[in-house]
Amino acid sequence: MCERKTDYAFEMACSNIRYGAGVTKEIGMDLQNMGARNVCLMTDRTLSQLPPVGVVLDSLTKHGVEYKIYEDVRVEPTDKSFKAAIDFAKQGHFDVYVAVGGGSVIDTCKAANLYASHPEAEFLDFVNAPIGKGKPITASLKPLIAVPTTAGTGSETTGVAIFDFENLKAKTGIANRALKPTLGMVDPLHTLHMPSRVAANSGFDVLCHALESFTALPYNLRSPCPSNPINRPAYQGSNPISDVWARHALKIVAKYLKRAVRDAGDVEARSSMHLASVFAGIGFGNAGVHLCHGMSYPIAGNVKTHRARGYNVEHPIVPHGLSVVLTSPAVFAFTANMCPERHLEAAQILGTDVSNIKKDDAGRVLADTLRSILYDLEVEDGLFAIGYTKEDIPSLVKGTIPQERVTKLSPRAHTEEDLTALFAASMKLY
C-alpha cells in the first residue's frame, strides 16, 4: 500500500525496436520463428497498394506464413471502425498480429488484439476513464509486430490506442502497457512514400510528444499514489529516463523536420525523423502528454468540412499532428511559469538564442519559436483556417474536459476559463 498522496516511483516500458533500411524483409522469418500459424495483417486501403505492404506480403509468402488481410482500417479511427476490426479479429482466431501503417493502423490492431483476447469484455471496459471504465487488462494478448510507415505517432513503442468516440465528438483511447507491440520494425525506406503534408503533420506529432512529455508534471507530483502497481498509469509524468528521449527527439526535429517535409527524397532527413518518432514515443509513452494532446481530441473530433492537404480520404479530416500543433504556441506560453527552465531549454534546442532571456519570458520565447517553425512549414493559420470560429469554443472546451488522462499531467492546473482562453488564442497564429 502507498502511504503517500503522490506517487514515488515510475516504470519504463517500451516495445523491442529493430531499425534498419530494408529490415521489413525479415518479418516472414520472425513469424516463422514464433511458430505463427494464422496471422492477422492490418493496413488501410491506400497503403495496401503501396510498397511497404507489398514487402510484408512477399516475406510472408516466401516463408510460408498463413495470413488473412484486413484493409478497412479508417484513417483517424472511430469507435465504429475499431469495432469492425475487433469483429474481424474475433472471427479469425489469430495467433499473431501484424500492423503495417501509421498510428491509425497500429492503434486499430492493438484494439483488435485486446478485445479478441478478452472476448467477454464490453467495448467501454478498457477505454480510459471517465469516458470508459479503465479496467486493468488481465489476459495475455497475442504477439503484435508493428511496421510504422509514418514518422510521427510512435505507436510502435507505446501501450496506447486512440480513436474518435463519435457520440462525444472527441477522441479518447485505451492506455495500458499490455497493448504495446512485441516488436516495432522501423524501416526508414517506408517513410519515402509519405506525401509532404503527411511528413509535416506526423513531424508535428513528434515535436509535441517530445515537448509535452519534457514539460509534463513530474512523476512524483502525480496523484493518486497507486494502491497496487497494476494501477500505475502508462502516462506517469516527466521522469529522468523519459527526459533523455524527449531531449534527443527535439534535437533531431530541430535538425531534420524542415528537410524531411521539403524533400521526400532526402533519405537522411526522413530516416532521422523516423527514429525521432521512436525516441519521442519511448519518452511520452511513459511520461505522457498534456494540454496540446488533450485539446487536440475535440479539434479532430468536431471537424466539419476541412479536407487536409495531401490525404487521400473521403471524409473531412484534421490530421492528428495538425490538431495537436495548432494550440502549441498558446499552451506553452500558458505552462511556462511552472517550469521555465525546461521551456527555455526546449526553445534553445529548437534553435533560439536564449542566453539573455529572463525566466518570466520563457513562455513567450518558446511560443514564438514554435510559431516560426509552423510559419516556415506553411501550416494553416490557426483553428479559424481549418473551419472553427469563436462560437465553437464551448464545444471544444466540453470535448477537452473528459481528457483527464492527459490534461491532469499539465504542469499548470487549469480551469474551463483557461481552456476557453487557450482555444481563443489558437484561432489565429500569425
Image: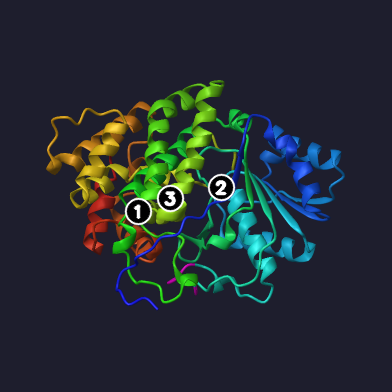
Magenta part of the chain:
128-133
Q: Residues within 10 Å of mark 3 (few under 14, many from 20)?
A: many
Tell whether position 140 is magenta.
Answer: no
Q: Nearer the viewer, residue 249 or 175?
A: 249
User: Residue 345: image x %, image y %?
Assistant: 26, 38
Q: Which residue is mark 2?
A: 103
Identify the disc placed on residue 238. Answer: 1
Residue 430 seen: no
Residue mark closest to the camera, 1 vs 3: 1
Q: Looking at the image, tell me whether mark 1 or mark 2 is earlier in sequence order.
A: 2
The kind of secondary structure element at disc 1 is loop
Residue 183 seen: yes
Residue mark closest to the camera, 1 vs 2: 1
CA–CA distance between discs 1 and 3? Answer: 8 Å
Q: Which residue is mark 3?
A: 284
What's the amino acid at mark 1? Ser
Q: Residue at x 58, y 62 (%)?
A: 178
User: Residue 128: image x %, image y %?
Assistant: 47, 67
Q: Residue at x 50, y 61 (%)?
A: 173
The kind of secondary structure element at disc 3 is helix
Tell me: residue 364, above or below residue 242.
above
Q: Residues within 10 Å of mark 2 (few under 14, many from 20)?
A: many
The kind of secondary structure element at disc 2 is helix
The image quadrant where one finds the N terminus is bottom left
Q: How many marks?
A: 3
